[in-house]
Structures are given as structure tokens and as C-alpha cells.
Image (tube, rainbow, N blue to C red):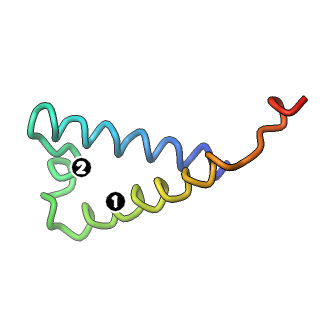
Amino acid sequence: MIDKLALILSIIGSLNWGSIGIFNFDIVGALFGGQDSILSRIIFIIVGISGIWCISLLFKKNSTLDQ
């Protein structure tokens, strides 16, 4: 459950970074009051933590692949 949530948040973060890179538009900042608002910063922190969690998925053995 945590793995899927971390992946979803990481995908959201990557889409936001893609929109910044391509369109120079911060979706999270636009939705939650700019990059400096406390709510945007909390979302950025949560997405960052989920990205760190996803690093562990690289080293996790998948039982379906081990059979």
C-alpha cells in the first residue's frame, strides 16, 4: 500500500516537474497558492519523501520475478 502511494506521489511530482520544464508552469504552486505557501511546501516535502521511499523499491525483491 505504501509502495503504491509513494509511486503515485512520485508520478505527480514528475508531472509537475515536467510542466515546469516544458511550460514554465508549476501546477502545485498554482493550485495551492504559489511555491512559497505553506501548503505547497508541505506537498513538495511529501512528494520528496515519496521519491526517497521509491529508491527502496529499486532494491526490493519482487516475488513474481523470483519464481
N-terminal label among 2 and 1: 2
Front residue of 27 and 17: 17
**Amino acid at dot 2:** Val
Q: Position of residue 61 (x, y in %)?
A: 77, 44
Front residue of 64 and 38: 64
Image quadrant assignment for residue 20: top left
Q: Position of residue 48 (x, y in %)?
A: 40, 59
**Amino acid at dot 1:** Ile
Q: Residue at x 63, y 48 (%)?
A: 57
Q: How many marks?
A: 2
- In the image, taking residue 1 as reference, residue 64 lies left or right, namely right
Mark 1 closeness class: few <14, some 14–19, many ≥20 residues within 10 Å: some
Q: Mark 2 = which residue?
A: 28
Q: Mark 1 = which residue?
A: 43
Image quadrant assignment for residue 16: top left
Mark 2 closeness class: few <14, some 14–19, many ≥20 residues within 10 Å: some
Q: Position of residue 53 (x, y in %)?
A: 55, 57
Q: Are marks 2 and 1 in contact (CB under 8 Å)?
A: yes
Q: Position of residue 46 (x, y in %)?
A: 42, 61
Disc 1 is placed on an element classified as helix
Asked if residue 13 is positioned above or below residue 42 in the image, the reply reads above
Front residue of 36 and 51: 51
Q: Residue at x 46, y 53 (%)?
A: 51
Front residue of 30 and 61: 61
Q: CA distance from mark 2 to mark 1?
A: 8 Å
Asked if residue 1 is positioned above or below residue 49 in the image, the reply reads above
**Furthest residue toward left:** 24
Disc 2 is placed on an element classified as helix
